Amino acid sequence: QVQLVESGGGSVQSGGSLRLSCAASGLTARSYCMGWFRQAPGKEREGVALINSYGNSAYADSVKGRFTTSQDNAKNTHYLQMNSLKPEDTAMYYCAAHPADYCSYSHSFYRYWGQGTQVTVSS
């Protein structure tokens, strides 16, 4: 059974940093796309950072240059380093996984989801 567990959320002031972690278990496919998504109240869930099993990453324009996703295969853990945080980054953040070589910003692409971790950025 696949399980994704996020951690690392919290409250920070504008300009601050947070690092989210996503610990994965039960992933047995040869390769996976791991995505980081966020959803603010009243808004659709949006993809912000993607990384595939080859280490290729991609970012939404809204976070490019500020967020970095990485993976530690030995620990089966993915990370989202978030710097220069802005109040508009406030949202519930989720990690997601799908068995594939390629990635997608569409949330419907992903088969597995974590429970989410809240990030709140105050001005």
Image (cartoon, grey):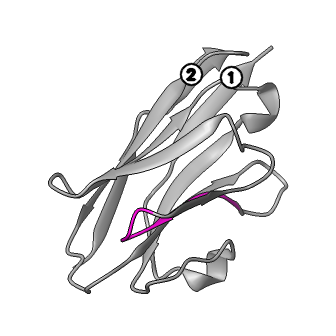
The disc placed on residue 17 is 2
Give the residue drawn at x 17%, y 52%.
Answer: 75
Q: Main secondary structure of the magenta part?
A: strand
Give the residue drawn at x 72%, y 35%.
Answer: 90
- Range covered by the magenta-colored residues: 47-55
Q: Give x and y (percent) for residue 43.
A: 83, 57
Q: Is residue 51 above or below residue 108?
A: above
Q: Earlier in the sequence, mark 2 or mark 1?
A: 2
Give the residue drawn at x 47%, y 83%.
Answer: 111
Locate the C terminus and report the quarter of the image it occupies.
top right
* Rendered image quadrant of residue 84: top right
* Rendered image quadrant of residue 27: bottom left
Q: How crowded is mark 1: few (under 14 residues within 10 Å), some or many (20 or more)?
A: some
Closest to the observer, 47 or 50: 50
- Amino acid at the residue labelled 1: Ser
- Left/right of residue 5 with respect to residue 26 in the rendered view: right
Residue marked by disc 1: 84
Q: Give x and y (percent) for residue 12.
A: 61, 17
